Image: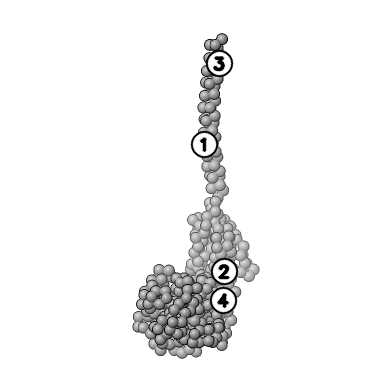
Amino acid sequence: MRKFIFGFVLFISLFAIGAETVFGSNRELSNPTISSEAGIVIEEKTGKVLFKKNSKTQLLPASITKIATAIYAIEKGNLNDIVTVSENARNVEGTRVYLEIGEQVSLKKLIQGLLINSGNDAGVAIAEHLDGSVEHFANNLNQYLRDIIGVANTHFENPHGLYHPNHLTTAEDMAKITQYAMKNKVFREIFSTKEIRWKGQAWDTTIYTHHKLMREKPYEGVNGGKTGYIKQSGHTLVTTAQRKNLDIIVVTMKAPSQNSAYSDTEKLLDYAFNNFQNTMIPKNTQFTTEENHFINDESLYITHKIGEKVKEDIHKNGLLKVTNEHNEILGSFQLKKLKTINDKNDSSKEILLEQNKVLDINLNYFVLVAIFVSLGIMGLLFFETRKI
């Protein structure tokens, strides 16, 4: 079966259907060693896991919880809503944006204070505004995380991540939550903000992201992040970064120190960018089998090791499978079927049959009219003859 060859060049070589592409490499990658108890690296567009360590182990997340709170608030709430700050929100412990009782703040501003300055008071104000209480908020948030995002090992008790023995998640779940959130334009904008003017009733200042790889110690490509720390959790860190067409999400949990959390994250970013790449199949690329034509109605991405041979196989039902030289599946995509020549011929036949039906009906109608007219004329002639 001869497959349609589509044009896509990584550097100088064709990415052909049914044939292996260039960049063959059998080199084995050495996983980096990290001091964090758990960690994971995924590619954002494809979800491909590039590294993991205890990624399914439930741990305390601390303030990286606020990523989940933020995307839930953005999707459920109205960003222009005006929130009235309660005494409960005003008096929460830990990092704050110093909200005052009765202060009125827009929901979007509270989300900014939550993500950029890690305001626990902003988190409580958001929870009470959306669901009436922290308890109801937690129940609804957990259902949202399960049903909408699809995580299975997360249970949150509050919007901010302050200690509760049952407030748990995993590195894998946090990567999935972040991956989902990054698809939202508003979230991406706030998550990537390095500094912003904050003018509140009790606090007039400029707030800065707490993530050091975004400001004090910039790492090339880092475009978002959230820190977390309480005594019981150790240091937690979520980082997003982009270089060329590779988008990386790194989660580390329970690092013994802040320095080790950042060191681990930099190692994992280096590992991802130095060893992996994305191959893109452009939108509207056409694929051909012996019987049918197929097309992808959006760009497709495959994450694989730099130098790794990649091959594609298009099945007759339009399922495109991309594998490496070890026959490991790198991506699987259901393509859209185009009309084949036979389909078009069948359609033409159907149209012709319909036209013939209409023609038959019209012809029958014409014959009936002609008969009635003839009978009428014969009747008139008969009466005229009688008169003579």
Reply above or below: 291 against 200: above
Residue wearing tag 2: 279
Q: Which mark is residue 242?
A: 4
Nearer-N-terminus badge (4/2): 4
**Residue 43 visible in the current orientation:** no
For the residue pair 347 and 281, the one nearer the viewer reads as 347
Residue wearing tag 3: 381
Residue at 54% in and 17% down: 380
Residue at 55% in and 50% down: 340
Nearer-N-terminus badge (3/2): 2
Quadrant location, the C terminus: top right
Say which quarter of the image contains residue 348: top right
For the residue pair 310 and 363, the one nearer the viewer reads as 363
Q: Amino acid at mark 2?
A: Thr
Q: Nearer the viewer, mark 3 or mark 4?
A: 3
Q: Nearer the viewer, mark 4 or mark 2?
A: 4
Reply above or below: 274 against 231: above
Residue at 56% in and 48% down: 341
Q: Nearer the viewer, mark 4 or mark 1?
A: 1
